[in-house]
Amino acid sequence: MAAPHVLVFPFPIQGHINCLLNFANALVDAGVHVTFLHTEHNLRRVASGAGSPHLRFLSVPDGLPDDHPRTAAYLPDLYKSLAAGTRGPFRDLLARSSSLVADAAGVDEPTGDFPPVTCLVADGLLGWAVEVADELGVPAIVMRTASACSLLAFLSVPKLFELGELPFPVGGDLDEPVRGVPGMETILRRRDLPSHCRRPNATYEVNPGLHALAKLSADSSKARALVLNTTPTLERTALEHIAPRVRDLFAIGPLHAMSSTAASSSLLREDGGCMAWLDAQAADRSVVYASLGSLATITREQFAELFAGLVATGYPFLWVLRPDMVADAAALEDEAVREAGGGGGSSKACVVAWAPQREVLRHRAVGCFLTHAGWNSTLEAIVDGVPTVCWPSSADQQMNSRFVGAVWRTGLDMKDRSRSSSTAMAGEAHVLVFPVPAQGHINAMLPFAAALLDAGVFVTFLHTDHNSRRASSVAA
Ligand code: UDP
């Protein structure tokens, strides 16, 4: 029998690359040869030392011009150009490297010490790659990088339309419960469904984003096997409802916690300086780490609000401000460091373009993670026991943050964060805020309590008897 050699092909964005590389690393640990397929554009950017003689990196073109921005706003371009422009080069590569074709055609592929490819693991967003493997007779399985709960929501989209839960009525209450996602009737409100559902009055046909994601989910479920980066400990119910809809389901996460091979996959250069800044923090669990992942973008107003909130906590914070996250991010980064009193060795704030997140979350000084609730970040925080404040941006993040706040209780769901998010949180969290009874400490913790209130959390602010008689505070 041929030695196993798996070709792993992620959709070429950071969260997907990290997830599939963790899977690749776990396969390598198990003695399997792995070829990890980047796009040419990404392979030039990753500083990947393979970390194992059983792991190699190859690339295919992504079909976009070199100067294409490839940011979140342009993901549909990337998606289309991969399906159209990458299919051919991928087919050639798989044909040359796979056992059957190599045997049949007697092709002498320069594989080095690598045996012929015996299996493809394709990202669920690359359904065409599975079709190519089928054409060539190479066994293929699909990996979805999102949570099981969000996959189940996407699989339930036709049912949600059938039941009249979708589309949402114009001006409808986003706190209305949603029927139709099995096992989640008591958990989900409209606002927790994937962000693509939020187009009022958009029927299935005229909501192309939702239509495409629901179709991709349905297609993934037809694969010979479906692999998810999750665990029944977190998502038993969702997995039980997905299992009957797929041929074979494997929940093998959290993958980042499982492999010892450490091939790097960062597309942006990590700023390791923030680790020294964390080392310099005297108090354990005192730092707020804030990162919205690799794709989310925010407006300048949201930047100002987030920044004010971080400062108002009174805690030192480490903030990942990607260059493409908000217009003029470089200028804002300087401003944030200056105004927060950070930089130059001062301890109040550290702002970086990209952090070694897994190391950051493991650091003793980090006590809270303000996150967009991307699935990798959510799992990484859970594994390292760092509580999260979730401010979801798009796609599956609305579902993940709901499960964080209402089911796993590993953090707070701060989605939509205004008016109606208070209703969402009511009764779910109650925080006792207990400052040192000195004016400076009280002043620092009051805004934090106010921010929790805004997020719908019940807050008890604990004064000493002495101060309570003196403070003229009225609860809002
Ligand atoms: N990440 C990182 N450094 C950062 C921010 C994020 O290494 O400064 C990593 C993080 O550890 C995670 C991935 O980028 O593995 C982000 O994936 P996630 O699913 O959380 O969000 P996405 O970027 O896909 O929205």
Image (spheres, helix red, strand yellow):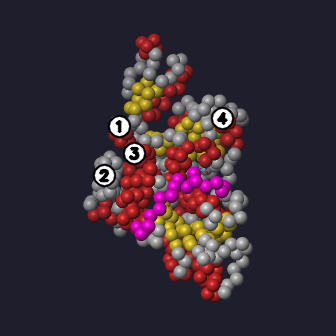
Give the amino acid at mark 3.
Answer: Val
- Quarter of the image where one finds residue 300: top right
Where does label 4 land, which residue?
A: 342
- The boundaries of the magenta stretch are 246-262
Task: Please report whichever mark, 4 or 3, sits nearer to the chain's N-terminal start.
Answer: 4
Where does label 3 land, which residue?
A: 407
Q: CA distance from mark 4 to mark 2?
A: 46 Å
Question: Crowding at label 1, few (<14), some or many (≥20) Cα neighbours within 10 Å?
Answer: some
Q: CA distance from mark 4 to mark 3?
A: 36 Å
Q: Residue at x 38, y 42 (%)?
A: 421
Q: Position of residue 82 (x, y in %)?
A: 56, 71
Q: CA distance from mark 2 to mark 1?
A: 18 Å
Question: Crowding at label 3, few (<14), some or many (≥20) Cα neighbours within 10 Å?
Answer: some
Q: Main secondary structure of the magenta part?
A: loop
Can residue 248 be seen here? The reply is yes
Q: Nearer the viewer, residue 25 or 206?
A: 25
Q: Residue at x 67, y 65 (%)?
A: 55
Where does label 2 land, which residue?
A: 185
Q: Secondary structure at mark 4?
A: loop
Q: CA distance from mark 3 to mark 2?
A: 13 Å
Q: Residue furthest left?
A: 163
